[in-house]
Amino acid sequence: MLTASDPEDALASLRRHFEAFTERFALEGGLSYPLELKKRHSGRVGQFALRIARELGWRGWDQAAAEGAGWLHDVGRFPQFARFATFQDHRSLDHGEEGFRLLEAEPFLEAWPPEERPRLASAVRFHNKRDVPPSCPELHRPLTLLIRDADKLDVFEVVQDAIDEGRIGEILSGVSLDAPPSPEFLAELQHGQTPVAYRHLYSLADFLLLQLSWIYNMNYPISFRLLSASGVLDRLVSRLPETPPVQSFVQRCLESVAQQGHGAP
């Protein structure tokens, strides 16, 4: 396919290739629940990314890159789950690196100008890292940071919806759904640290605390405002124990969200 001259045409091509790629992982009855969830998540992240980009004043190829990278950020999840039956990178593979590899091997970006492709690849590669590494080119960082925000915004919703539907065990394997926070996580909370050690992830409560800590790794004021407006933090907090160390951490997080949401855009 020739390179598209219009960003909307390039996005349409990207979405077609994404659809065809995900269909490879369908069973007789369609995609499994976890992979169908990831497919829907990808589209929603694309929409979150587009909304953030518009608020930031991005136009043209910049805006298209935001939506396109949102659609592609989790392509590595599909072979990951097919091979390992888990979405936990520390138990399988780094899905950001797998996605980066797939962008080289698959025609997702064939309609995009060659000069636009590297920053989408960086966004896919680095969206899941604890921090954006120095190896990410400076010109690629704004898009990478945007996708990291858009991804978190939707995952907050995905987790709460899966709990409500009684299906969280299908996407969060290997953890206890009923156990309290682990001593290791509570120790980190008591020392004023954000819980980021996946090796200490033993329970759903641990995961919710870990997820709450993501707010310290979000970037744009509009992202904090969208998070506040969604009400998802209220849903998450309602599922945490009312013990002093947990509630102290919760309060710090909520205050930070309110503070970071000020400013433009």
Image (cartoon, helix red, strand yellow):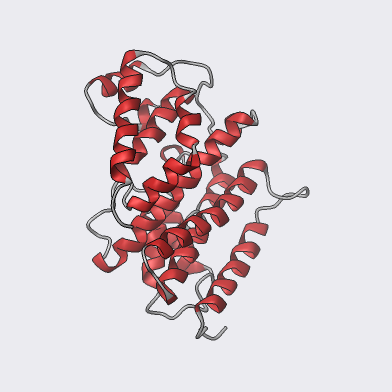
**Residue that appears at 53% across and 69% down:** 108
Image position of 241 with respect to 130: above or below: above
Q: Residue furthest top?
A: 243
Image position of 211 with respect to 46: above or below: above
- Image quadrant in which you'd find residue 165: top right
Side of 263 where 203 appears, left or right = right
- Percent across and percent down for residue 166 are 64, 28
**Residue that appears at 39% across and 50% down:** 223
Q: For the N terminus, which image quadrant? A: bottom right
**Residue that appears at 49% across and 42% down:** 230
Q: Is residue 98 visible?
A: yes
Front residue of this view, candidates 218 and 85: 218
- Image quadrant in which you'd find residue 22: bottom right
Front residue of this view, candidates 136 and 66: 66
Q: Is residue 86 visible?
A: no
**Residue that appears at 39% across and 33% down:** 212
- Image quadrant in which you'd find residue 85: top right
Q: How many marks?
A: 0
Image position of 148 with respect to 57: above or below: above
- Percent across and percent down for residue 127 are 38, 53
Q: For the C terminus, which image quadrant? A: bottom left
Q: Residue furthest right?
A: 28
Front residue of this view, candidates 26 and 213: 213
Image position of 117 with respect to 83: above or below: below
- Percent across and percent down for residue 261 are 33, 46
